Image (tube, grey):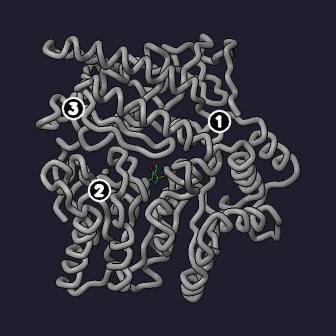
């Protein structure tokens, strides 16, 4: 399972880095942003949990949750290329791959969730899920979690407060009702101000309040959509009982529950295939969307639902056709991903190594005042940095500093959350105990370094673009952007 590569993997680049940057600035829309904007790395090859730049320098990848079974896994590459050499076409032709994949995929879900639609991306999956919910319920209104992200099409941007909270977006879409994310460290109800309270119930009540607002307007709830663990919102784990109560309120109101597993699905949480299963066996969404890890980098995604929801969609008389969704190549690739997760014990690895990381982070927390909170399960872990434990003031600039310093140590990490102060750990699932040691010891060094210079002004890398503008990275928390009330 551990595919350690110590040798340098050097591949010739078509363009030198300066030229690549120059042409990128000219031809690629500037809203498509790069990791490490001040000094982007040019990655040419990757294998397992490692990525290699144009000099063959190895980076330990702690952020690529898409390369789920490891970058360029030979079995995935073979499955795709073998099928590509045989046939690739649309799903109007009878073919076994789509059937075998549907059978295999649904076998990983509670039995009610037995029907699939195959699409090409998480955005498409959520867009379709929304259509299914509106068709089934004849409702229009959608209850969404604050800081949630569900994709980039118009319809899903309108239910992604991570995006519509941004000043440049315009106003909150009228049909979206934002409820607070159940973040018990920094959220509306938290372990500091509400110790001992039932956070699952408190936060679920917010959903009930949103349902009441919908009713007051004389409208109907179509759906509640949320990730089962919120990734974009800063690696948030749902408090016990939360989803069960939310789903019950939504069902009472005649709505459907859409669970977005696009980032966290396919065993990332270790003990289960899907994040919603962490909330108990009796928590069953009506629609689940999956994507990213499903193709290990190849674009394939799916919507899984009940026969009843699918049948009502059929009754509209509108055919569902998708040129690429469910094609034999994508299905062969997704099948090989599921097979590798099982064969290589990757869920078990995420459980074991994830637990080791969590317990070592708890120890590090005692040593480093910079760490406000550590939370996580399996290979879904967040380290929330604070300027001061008492006030919990977010350490936004420090988080950026950690990321850039880690990059100098050839370890790739990212930061997210409304204040961009949460270090996100979501590596390929073959990340080993040895990798964890490396990650934690470098973090220890860098945290110490930052704490030692705490009272000095933190100098963040400055990014210069061709038009001469400068931009100091990470100094702006996302929450600076306007707040949108439900
Ligand atoms: C939770 C979640 N849902 C949906 C999407 C959209 O997926 P895609 O980029 O494949 O369209 C993303 C992408 O980051 C995501 O994180």
Would residue 101 be visible to someone looking at this image? yes
Q: Going from the N terminus, do you reach mark 2 or mark 3 first?
A: 2
When asked about the image quadrant of residue 73, the answer is top right
When asked about the image quadrant of residue 77, the answer is top right
Q: Do residues under tags 3 and 1 come within 8 Å of each other at their CB atoms?
A: no
Which structural element holds mark 2? helix
Neighbour tally class for label 1: few under 14, some 14-19, many 20 plus, Cα within 10 Å: many
Query: In this image, 366 relative to 340: left or right?
Result: left
Mark 2 close to ligand 1, CB under 8 Å: no
Query: In this image, 218 relative to 80: left or right?
Result: left
Is residue 356 shown above or below 262? above
- Which residue position holds label 2? 161
When asked about the image quadrant of residue 353, the answer is top right
Mark 3 close to ligand 1, CB under 8 Å: no
The mark lying in front, picked from 1 and 2, is: 1
Of residues 67 and 37, the one drawn nearer to the viewer in this rendering:
67
Percent position (x, y) of residue 290? 55, 58
Which structural element holds mark 3? strand
Residue 70 got which mark? Answer: 1
- Which residue position holds label 3? 386
Neighbour tally class for label 2: few under 14, some 14-19, many 20 plus, Cα within 10 Å: many
Which structural element holds mark 1? loop
Mark 1 close to ligand 1, CB under 8 Å: no
Which residue corresponds to the image point at 36% horizontal and 71% vertical from the top-left? 224
Q: Going from the N terminus, do you reach mark 1 or mark 2 first?
A: 1
Q: Quadrant of the N terminus?
A: top right
Residue 327 got which mark? Answer: none
């Amino acid at each position: 399972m551990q595919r350690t590569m110590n040798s340098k993997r050097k591949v010739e680049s078509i363009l030198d880095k300066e030229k690549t940057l120059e042409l990128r600035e000219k031809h690629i829309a500037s809203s498509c942003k790069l990791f490490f904007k001040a000094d982007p790395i040019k990655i040419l090859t990757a294998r397992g949990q490692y990525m290699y730049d144009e000099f063959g320098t190895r980076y330990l990848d702690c952020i690529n949750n898409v390369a789920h079974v490891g970058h360029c896994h030979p079995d995935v590459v073979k499955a795709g290329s073998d099928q590509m050499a045989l046939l690739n076409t649309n799903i109007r032709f009878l073919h076994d791959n789509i059937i075998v994949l549907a059978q295999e995929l649904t076998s990983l879900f509670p039995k009610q969730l037995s029907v699939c639609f195959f699409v090409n991306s998480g955005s498409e999956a959520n867009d379709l899920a929304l259509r299914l919910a509106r068709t089934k319920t004849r409702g229009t209104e959608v209850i969404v979690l604050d800081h949630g992200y569900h994709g980039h099409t118009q319809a899903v941007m309108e239910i992604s407060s991570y995006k519509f909270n941004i000043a440049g977006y315009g106003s909150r879409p009228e049909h979206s009702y934002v409820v607070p994310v159940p973040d018990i460290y920094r959220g509306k109800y938290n372990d500091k101000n509400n110790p001992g309270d039932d956070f699952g119930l408190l936060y679920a009540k917010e959903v009930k309040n949103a349902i009441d607002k919908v009713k007051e307007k004389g409208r109907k709830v179509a759906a509640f959509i949320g990730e089962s663990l919120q990734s974009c919102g800063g690696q948030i784990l749902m408090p016990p009982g939360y989803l069960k109560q939310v789903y019950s309120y939504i069902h009472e109101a005649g709505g459907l529950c859409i669970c977005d597993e696009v980032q966290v699905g396919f065993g990332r949480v270790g003990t289960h295939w899907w994040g919603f299963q962490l909330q108990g066996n009796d928590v069953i969404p009506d629609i689940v969307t999956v994507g990213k890890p499903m193709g290990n980098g190849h674009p394939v995604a799916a919507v899984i639902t009940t026969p009843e929801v699918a049948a009502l969609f059929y009754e509209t008389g509108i055919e569902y056709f998708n040129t690429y969704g469910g094609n034999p190549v994508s299905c062969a690739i997704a099948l090989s991903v599921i097979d590798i997760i099982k064969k290589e014990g990757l869920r078990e690895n995420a459980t074991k190594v994830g637990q080791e990381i969590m317990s070592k982070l708890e120890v590090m927390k005692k040593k480093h005042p910079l760490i406000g909170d550590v939370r996580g399960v399996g290979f879904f872990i967040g380290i929330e940095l604070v300027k001061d434990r008492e006030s919990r003031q977010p350490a936004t600039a420090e988080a950026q500093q950690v990321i850039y310093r880690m990059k100098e140590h050839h370890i790739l990490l990212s930061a997210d959350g409304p204040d961009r102060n949460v270090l996100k750990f979501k590596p390929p699932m073959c990340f080993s105990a040895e990798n964890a040691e490396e990650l934690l010891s470098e973090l220890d060094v860098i945290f110490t370094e930052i704490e030692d210079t705490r009272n000095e002004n933190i100098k963040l890398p400055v990014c210069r673009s061709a038009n001469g503008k400068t931009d100091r990275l990470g100094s702006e928390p996302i929450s600076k952007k306007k707040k949108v009330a439900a």
